[in-house]
Image (cartoon, rainbow, N blue to C red):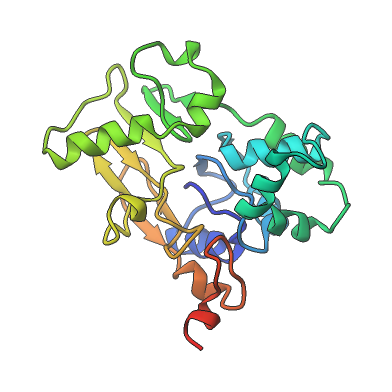
């Protein structure tokens, strides 16, 4: 699962619809539980209730971590950018001028820049630099750069599917499928790369996929779960349909 962006209701739907067992199953979350919809605090609480959670660092997680660790300037451009890109909803979720709970801060502090499973499946938020070993790639590249997904999608459109050796499979988030193709509401498989961000932060859905069977379950459209909230869309569902 990836990029729920404060959408607790969508998280609950995906967990319930997939039959996920919070005691027995492992959840690989590819980052960005924060920023956008109004329930970041509840979303993190839910993730912390999962016994076997592997949490990957997302770019919005990095922003939130910097803010709540006192590393973001109170008057700087970075703070303004974060607040306007969904950070304001995170601040409201925890309460203005209130700290993030220690357990929530630890989740973000301990988030991995990437994870490789025992059977050589790579999980990373944004992508990686194919020209160098992943362990030599800067964290900012792994959580911010869209070069990897652009290259994969370019090959996909040319029907030249790449196999990202030495990995059996690669799972990424960060770039909504809807930004590549408005009709792509399911996770997008490009060769052995799967893009899991199906636009929950905006007008899309949240998706969860079984890494073994490849079956996908999805939430309702997140805008409709929070009809009075703008999220990161600039306009709420009710405003659009008033």
**Image height check: is 4 above or below 131?**
below
The foreground one among 50 and 109 is 109
Q: Total label count?
A: 0
The foreground one among 201 and 1 is 201
Using residue 52 as the reference point, say whether residue 177 is left or right of it. left
**Residue 112 % position (x, y):** 58, 27
**Image height check: is 180 above or below 144?**
below
The foreground one among 236 and 77 is 77
The residue lying at 80 percent from left, 40 percent from top is 68
**Residue 192 % position (x, y):** 25, 32
**Image height check: is 155 above or below 23?**
above
**Residue 105 % position (x, y):** 76, 39
Using residue 154 as the reference point, say whether residue 6 is left or right of it. right
Q: In the figure, residue 75 lies in which quadrant?
A: top right
The residue lying at 27 percent from left, 23 percent from top is 164
The residue lying at 83 percent from left, 40 percent from top is 102
**Residue extending furthest left?**
159
The residue lying at 83 percent from left, 35 percent from top is 70
């Amino acid at each position: 699962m990836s990029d729920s962006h404060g959408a607790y209701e969508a998280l609950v739907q995906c967990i319930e619809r997939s039959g996920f067992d919070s005691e027995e199953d492992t959840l690989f979350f590819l980052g960005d539980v924060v920023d956008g919809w109004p329930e970041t605090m509840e979303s993190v609480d839910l993730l912390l209730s999962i016994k076997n959670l592997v949490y990957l660092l997302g770019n919005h997680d990095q922003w939130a971590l910097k803010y709540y660790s006192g590393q973001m300037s109170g008057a700087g451009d970075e703070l303004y950018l974060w607040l306007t890109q969904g950070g304001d909803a995170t601040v409201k979720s925890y309460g203005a001028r209130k700290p993030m709970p220690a357990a929530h801060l630890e989740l973000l502090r301990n988030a991995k820049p990437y994870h490789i499973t025992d059977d050589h499946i790579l999980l990373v938020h944004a992508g990686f630099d194919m020209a160098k070993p992943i362990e030599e790639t800067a964290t900012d590249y792994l959580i911010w750069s869209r070069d990897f997904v652009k290259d994969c999608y370019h090959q996909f459109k040319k029907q030249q599917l790449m196999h990202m050796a030495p990995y059996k499979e690669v799972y990424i988030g960060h770039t909504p499928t809807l930004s590549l193709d408005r009709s792509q509401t399911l996770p997008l498989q490009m060769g052995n790369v799967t893009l899991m961000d199906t636009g929950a932060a905006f007008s899309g859905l949240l998706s969860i996929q079984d890494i073994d069977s490849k079956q996908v379950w999805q939430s309702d459209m997140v805008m409709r779960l929070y009809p009075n909230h703008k999220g990161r869309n600039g306009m709420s569902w009710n405003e659009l349909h008033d």
